Image (cartoon, rainbow, N blue to C red):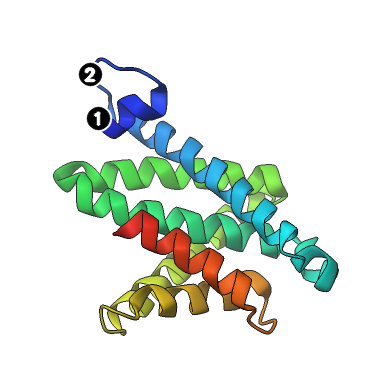
C-alpha cells in the first residue's frame, strides 16, 4: 500500500478501504488518460486526424487503454480484494466517460465496450511472446484509439512505453 500513500502525498502508512483505493486508482487513470490525449495531440494526431481526435470514441478509447493497464495492476496486486476494487473502479470509469460525453442511458453499452476492449487487450498480451507482448498491446491499442488510422512510430512508442512502464 506504499504506492497509495505516495498517490495521496503521505509519508506515513494509512489504512484504506477498497472504495478509497478504487478512488485513488480512478484519479490515476484520469490523469494518465489526460496525459495520453495531450501526448497524442503534441505528436500531431489532432492535426492529422481532426475528425477522429475530436470524437467521443477517441476519448473513450484512450480512457479504456489506460484503465486496462490499471486493471492488470489491480489483478496482480490486490488478490482477494481485486474484484471489489475493479467493480468500484468500473463505476468511476463510467463517470469519467460520462464527463467526456457518454450519456447516462448508455451505461450498459459502455460496460460491454469496456469488457470487450479489456478482452482484446489481455488477448494481445497473452498471444505474444514475452519480448513482443507490449508491442502487440500497443498495436491493438493504437488501432482502437486511432479508429484504424495508420500507425505512426511516435504513437506506437507512446503506447508501448506506457504499457511497459506500467506493467513491468
SS type, badge 1: helix
Q: What is the quadrant of residue 20 in the picture?
A: top left
Residue on which disc 2 sits = 13
Q: Most extreme residue toward the left, as rendered?
A: 80
Res 144 visible = no
Please tell me the numbered disc located at residue 73.
none
What is the CA distance from the residue labelled 2 to the residue labelled 1? 7 Å
The reply to whether residue 134 is visible in this rendering is yes
Horizontally, residue 100 falls left or right of residue 92, namely right
Relative to 165, 79 lies left or right: left
Question: Which one is earlier in the sequence, the residue at label 2 or at label 1?
Answer: 1
Q: Nearer the viewer, residue 37 or 102?
A: 37
- Residue at 66% of width from left, 82% of height from top? 148
Point out the image quarter for the N terminus.
top left
Q: Are marks 2 and 1 in contact (CB under 8 Å)?
A: yes
Q: How many marks?
A: 2
Q: Residue 120 appears at what percent x and percent y? A: 42, 76
Coordinates of residue 155 in the picture (x, y in percent): 61, 70
Residue 145, by quadrant, is: bottom right
Q: Quadrant of residue 115?
A: bottom left
Task: Quickly name the residue at label 1.
Answer: 2
Identity of the residue drawn at 32% across and 58% down: 167
Residue drawn at (38%, 63%) of the image: 164
The residue under the point 31% across, 41% down is 85
- Secondary structure under the numbered disc 2 in the rendered image: loop
Amino acid at each position: 500500500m506504499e504506492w497509495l500513500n505516495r498517490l495521496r502525498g503521505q509519508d506515513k502508512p494509512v489504512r484504506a478501504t477498497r472504495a478509497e483505493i478504487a478512488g485513488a486508482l480512478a484519479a490515476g487513470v484520469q490523469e494518465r488518460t489526460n496525459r495520453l490525449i495531450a501526448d497524442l495531440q503534441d505528436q500531431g494526431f489532432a492535426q492529422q486526424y481532426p475528425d477522429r481526435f475530436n470524437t467521443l470514441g477517441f476519448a473513450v478509447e484512450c480512457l479504456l487503454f489506460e484503465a486496462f493497464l490499471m486493471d492488470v495492476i489491480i489483478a496482480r496486486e490486490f488478490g482477494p480484494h481485486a474484484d471489489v476494487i475493479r467493480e468500484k473502479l468500473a463505476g468511476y470509469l463510467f463517470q469519467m466517460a460520462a464527463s467526456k460525453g457518454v450519456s447516462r442511458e448508455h451505461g450498459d453499452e459502455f460496460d460491454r465496450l469496456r469488457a470487450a476492449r479489456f478482452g482484446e487487450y489481455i488477448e494481445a498480451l497473452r498471444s505474444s511472446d514475452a519480448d513482443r507482448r507490449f508491442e502487440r498491446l500497443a498495436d491493438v491499442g493504437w488501432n482502437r484509439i486511432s479508429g484504424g488510422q495508420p500507425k505512426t512510430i511516435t504513437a506506437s512508442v507512446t503506447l508501448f512505453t506506457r504499457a511497459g512502464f506500467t506493467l513491468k
